[in-house]
């Protein structure tokens, strides 16, 4: 079985995340994609929205896709989670699964700084997708890292959680930047300042 991990703060999850996952799933023939919200320490929270709430939004977003799941591993663990540690744990628990890690261009550029990137790159393949703001340039990476990245062709979407939070705080609509199910939940719970 081939599983893609889509990690992020998901504060909130938006259609850019979902299209990145779907593009990667199709390009690499993944059986499933697991969306894994990171633990964000309270003092670093950009939004005042809790981990439980971010997870609930992820669950609402992935529900309609038969191959998408949520994974609360890093949230439950708490503290700082390095991807290498999470991946070691996942591979211990699921020895029969080939794991992929899906990331946007901003994260691809940052890969050389990831903890124990050499071992991580031997343990799994990265699937990189285009994102406005950072060129997706594998030639800029050391060859041993570039060799572990597959590029999946994604229409660029100039969408970020930061911009969505800002719009919501200004009282502007965030409909269609997030799936309907996420919009319903956000407005029902009054998250990000969105009014019912
Ligand atoms: P923030 O503005 O809070 O940083 P974000 O929109 O960047 O939020 P993250 O949760 O930081 O979302 O990102 C999780 C993953 O999704 C990262 O690998 C990121 O590159 C990728 N990603 C986020 N938005 C997009 C997008 N519009 N297109 C492609 N990839 C994206
Ligand atoms: Mg980000």
Image (cartoon, grey):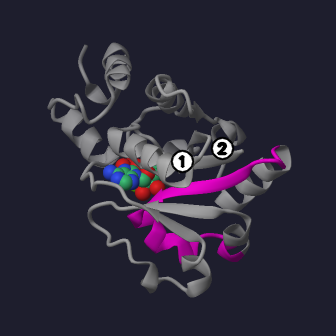
**Residue 5 falls within the magenta-colored stretch:** no
Relative placement, left or right, of 35 versus 171 is right
Callout 1 secondary element: strand
Q: Position of residue 158 (x, y in %)?
A: 24, 53
Q: Position of residue 92 (x, y in %)?
A: 85, 50
Q: CA distance from mark 1 to mark 2?
A: 12 Å
Callout 2 secondary element: helix
For image coordinates 26% across by 36% down, the residue present is 177
Q: From the Cβ of disc 1, is ligand 1 less than 8 Å away?
A: yes
Rendered image: mark on residue 74: 2
* Front-lying residue, 120 or 82: 120
Observer-side mark, 1 or 2, equals: 1
In this rendering, the count of numbered labels is 2
**Neighbour class for label 1 at 10 Å: few (<14), some, many (≥20)?**
many
For image coordinates 50% across by 23% down, the residue present is 63
Which numbered disc, 1 or 2, marks the residue that appears first in the sequence? 1
Q: Position of residue 124 (x, y in %)?
A: 68, 62
For image coordinates 54% across by 78% down, the residue present is 146
In the picture of the structure, the residue carrying the numbered disc 1 is 6
The image shows residue 4, relative to residue 103, as above or below, that is above
Rendered image: mark on residue 114: none
**Neighbour class for label 2 at 10 Å: few (<14), some, many (≥20)?**
some
Q: Quadrant of the N terminus?
A: top right
Q: Quadrant of the C terminus?
A: top left
Q: Which residues are magenta?
A: 94-118
Q: Position of residue 87 (x, y in %)?
A: 72, 55
* Front-lying residue, 185 or 23: 23
For image coordinates 47% across by 46% down, the residue present is 21
């Amino acid at each position: 079985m081939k599983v893609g991990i889509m990690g992020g703060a998901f504060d909130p999850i938006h259609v850019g995340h979902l299209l990145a996952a779907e593009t990667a799933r199709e390009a690499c023939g993944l059986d499933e994609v697991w969306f894994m919200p990171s633990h964000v320490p309270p003092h670093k929270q950009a939004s005042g929205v809790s981990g439980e709430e971010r997870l609930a939004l992820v669950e609402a977003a992935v529900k309609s896709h038969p191959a998408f799941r949520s994974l609360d591993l890093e949230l439950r663990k708490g503290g700082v989670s390095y991807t290498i540690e999470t991946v070691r744990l996942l591979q211990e628990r699921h020895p029969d699964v080939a794991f992929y890690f899906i990331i946007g261009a901003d994260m691809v550029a940052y890969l050389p700084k990831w903890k124990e990137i050499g071992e991580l790159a031997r343990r799994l393949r990265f699937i990189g997708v285009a994102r406005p703001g950072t060129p997706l340039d594998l030639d800029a990476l050391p060859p041993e890292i570039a060799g572990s990245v597959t590029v999946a062709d994604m229409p660029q979407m100039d969408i970020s959680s930061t911009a969505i939070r800002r719009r919501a705080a200004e009282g502007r609509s965030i409909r269609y930047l997030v799936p309907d199910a996420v919009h319903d939940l956000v407005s029902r719970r009054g998250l990000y300042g969105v009014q019912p």
